[in-house]
Structures are given as C-alpha cells and as structure tokens.
Amino acid sequence: MDYDAQRELQQELSAGERLAWSGRPRQGLRLRAADAVMIPFSLMWGGFAFFWEWSVLHQGGPGFFALWGIPFVVIGLYMIFGRFFYDAWQRSRTYYGITDQRAIIRTARGVKSLSLQNLTDLSLKERGDRSGTIAFGAADPRYAMWANVGWPGTARYLPPSFEMIDNARQVYDQIRDSQRAMQQLKGNA
C-alpha cells in the first residue's frame, strides 16, 4: 500500500469500511500512446504559429495580425510543452483505493466512488513492466483515441480508471477477488 494514498483516502472511508489497497499513478513527465500523433501535430501547429508571429513582427505587418497570432502561439506552447506538465500536475494530486466495498478515485477536482458490486465492465491494459491501467467501464469509441492527448477536459470521454499504476494485474485480480467475495456473501444471505 502507498502510505501517501492511504493517508489521503482515509477520510473518504465510511464507518466499518477498510482500505484493502491504495496507490497512485506514476509520477513525473510521461509519454502516452496519443503522443505519437500529438507531438508531430503540436510541432506543426507551434511552428506555423511562431512563423506567423515572427513574420508579422519582422515585416511590419498590421498590429491586428500580431495580436491575432498570440493565442495560437500560446496554444502551440501548451501543446508542445505545457500539456506534459499539466498531466504530471494532475497525476501528482491523484490517489486510488480499493476497499471491501468500492473503488475510490480522488483527484484535485473531487472524489469518484464506484461500487465493486455494481461494476460489470472492468478492463486491464498491462505493459511489459507490469504497470498499466484498469478501466471501470467502456470508453466511448468515437473519442477514446483523443481522450489522453493532454488537453484539459478530454478525460471526460474516458471511463473512470486507475491509470498508470504499478503491478496492475495484481490490483485487477484483487478487485475481481473482492467482487467474487461480495457475490458469495450475497448468495449466502
């Protein structure tokens, strides 16, 4: 169990509820699969925006054109650099937990609680280093590819998930074991 996550999640527990696992997403700057598309796109966007601003400023273009290009330069800087820092900042404020009753996701924006008993669609994406993501539900296929591009708000197109966790298979198995135990208790009642 991750001590920091355990401390942060303790206040979210109901009376009699026990924390079985806690963790956090991997920290620091990370590349994602969507970056294979976003990095070239951001470099083209930023390159054009910087060229536009440079051309307007050095060739004496109208002031309106110089002002027009500023938002595009800012967006380009965010897409090239800022989105990586925003993603790292978000993950630094994210905590995951599994109790005997539910899965808890605590972020800077709030707390999401998912009943283990009612989870029907649980998926695991595991990497070679045993890290991975556990999704609690299906992603909207129209937006799934673009959901982790680092643009604020795009995560709403993804199901709640334990993202970039270590030993993902072990955590996935623990969730499935808890679900089976709950089913057995329900069947014996």
Image (cartoon, grey):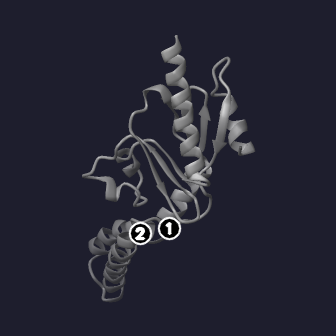
Is 11 placed above or below 127 here?
above
* Element at label 1: loop
Is 175 placed above or below 50 here?
above
In the picture, measured across the screen, residue 157 lies left or right of residue 93, that is left
The structure residue drawn at horizontal position 38% and vertical position 47%, both measured from the top left corner, is: 158
Is 106 placed above or below 185 here?
below
Residue 115 visible in the displayed image: no
Residue contact between numbered discs 1 and 2, judged by CB atoms under 8 Å? yes
The structure residue drawn at horizontal position 35% and vertical position 65%, both measured from the top left corner, is: 71
Q: CA distance from mark 1 to mark 2?
A: 6 Å
Specify the farthest residue to the bottom.
59
| Rendering coords of residue 91 (x, y %) | 57, 52
Is 152 placed above or below 122 here?
below
Query: Mark 2 highlights which residue?
Result: 35
Query: Mark 1 highlights which residue?
Result: 31
Residue 62 visible in the displayed image: yes
| Rendering coords of residue 165 (x, y %) | 58, 53
In the picture, measured across the screen, residue 159 lies left or right of residue 9, that is left
The structure residue drawn at horizontal position 68% and vertical position 42%, both measured from the top left corner, is: 5
* Element at label 2: helix
The structure residue drawn at horizontal position 60% and vertical position 48%, both measured from the top left corner, is: 170
Q: Amino acid at mark 1?
A: Leu
Residue 141, which numbered label?
A: none
| Rendering coords of residue 48 (x, y %) | 31, 80
Most foreground residue, 95 or 18: 18
Q: Amino acid at mark 2?
A: Asp
Specify the farthest residue to the top.
189
